[in-house]
Amino acid sequence: MSSVETNGLTRRFGSFMAVDHLSFEVKEGEVFGLLGPNGAGKTTTVRMLACLISSSEGSASVGGYDIGRDSLKVRQIVGILTENPSLYERLTAYENMDFFAEAYGLSDVQEKRNRIRELLEFFELYERRNNKVATFSKGMKQKLAIARALVHQPPILFLDEPTAGLDPESSKVIRDLIERLSQREKHTILLCTHHLEDAEKLCNRVMIINRGKSVIVGSPDELRDKIAGQPVLQVILKNLNQKIIEAIKDVKQVKEVDVDNSASRLIITLDDVKSVTPEVVRSIVYAGGMVLSVNTLRPSLEEAYLKLVKEE
Ligand SMILES: Nc1ncnc2c1ncn2[C@@H]1O[C@H](COP(=O)(O)OP(=O)(O)OP(=O)(O)O)[C@@H](O)[C@H]1O
Ligand SMILES: [Mg+2]
């Protein structure tokens, strides 16, 4: 079942097309990444889906509810971390949570307390619950902002750049929390990011968008293979000479041999790394080469992404 489905979703600002006929689907329980350079239309897409702004054209449903007709319902089942979440700095962490719980209509006092406690504990902020938010680090504020988005137990979560501006350590903390949220609480998560590491580690599928349009959709592995091509073989030798290089080129499936003489390193492009590697190694050894190491190098999602955006 799909949790989010859009059909030709479009948003114009004046004559400018910020989101241009986007159609995609986020399945229930999936972590779906929206990836793209600055100004690609990620935030605008999420804002439409969360009913914070209207769409200009097309349609979308969230949890089965139409964003145009059932915006109240959509707001009830969606938690959103916006690009610049504003917390009340002069209130404590607990008071911030309490304020939002009230705003979402959690009227049962005990239930509200339990929920806030559970969330603050999950995000490891319970000990600091009575401290003012103004005294919090950026990472702590981000955790609190995500906790706040979850106060009404929404099954669907929109996270707009959850690790933006955080150091690697805090980014990892947030990433781990998102992973736990998706695995333990089975949230459906739509994640906007330009952190390739986030996308690679967290997302089941990713859609790359540019200038409001979808460029490609697939799992991180699929995107890597589709955009950056097949993995290549790296061979490091103790001795390297022309005879060895020619011997490798004679192997039928070898397409290209790049030579890095200074490091006695070869980067070999071939049709099917797995099955052809033994033959390549054999040809090197027959030609008198002494092999120090053989590795398969996979292009990273980052390389794939940069290549794609540059081509666009
Ligand atoms: N309220 C607005 N009025 C006019 N133009 C807008 C408005 N909101 C967004 N835009 C434009 O729409 C385009 C898409 O913006 P959006 O914020 O969705 O991009 P983004 O992918 O989230 O980028 P970033 O990675 O920088 O957050 C940009 O060119 C932006 O200037
Ligand atoms: Mg944005």
Image: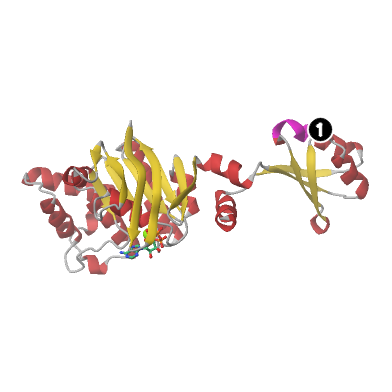
Name the residue rendered at 32%, 52% in the picture: 46
- Relative to the observer, which residue lies in front, 22 or 297? 22
**Residue 92 placement (x, y as % from top left):** 18, 63
Residue 196 horizontal side relative to residue 74, left or right: right
| 279 shown above or below 119 | above
**Residue 299 placement (x, y as % from top left):** 62, 48
Secondary-structure class at tag 1: helix
What amino acid is labelled 1 in the image?
Glu
Residue 253 horizontal side relative to residue 217, left or right: right
- Relative to the observer, which residue lies in front, 227 or 82? 227
Give the overall secondary structure of the magenta segment.
helix
| Quadrant assignment, res 125 | bottom left
- Is residue 276 on the magenta stretch? yes
The magenta stretch spans which residues? 274-279
Q: Tell me if residue 268 can be seen.
A: yes
- Is residue 40 on the magenta stretch? no
Q: Residues within 10 Å of mark 1 (few under 14, many from 20)?
A: some
Ligand 1: quadrant of the figure:
bottom left
Name the residue rendered at 80%, 47% in the picture: 257
Residue 237 horizontal side relative to residue 213, left or right: right
Q: Does the residue tagged 1 have its C-beta within 8 Å of any atom of ligand 1?
A: no
Q: Name the residue under label 1.
A: 279
- Relative to the observer, which residue lies in front, 181 or 120? 181
Q: Locate the C terminus and report the quarter of the image it occupies.
A: bottom right
Name the residue rendered at 21%, 68% in the picture: 89
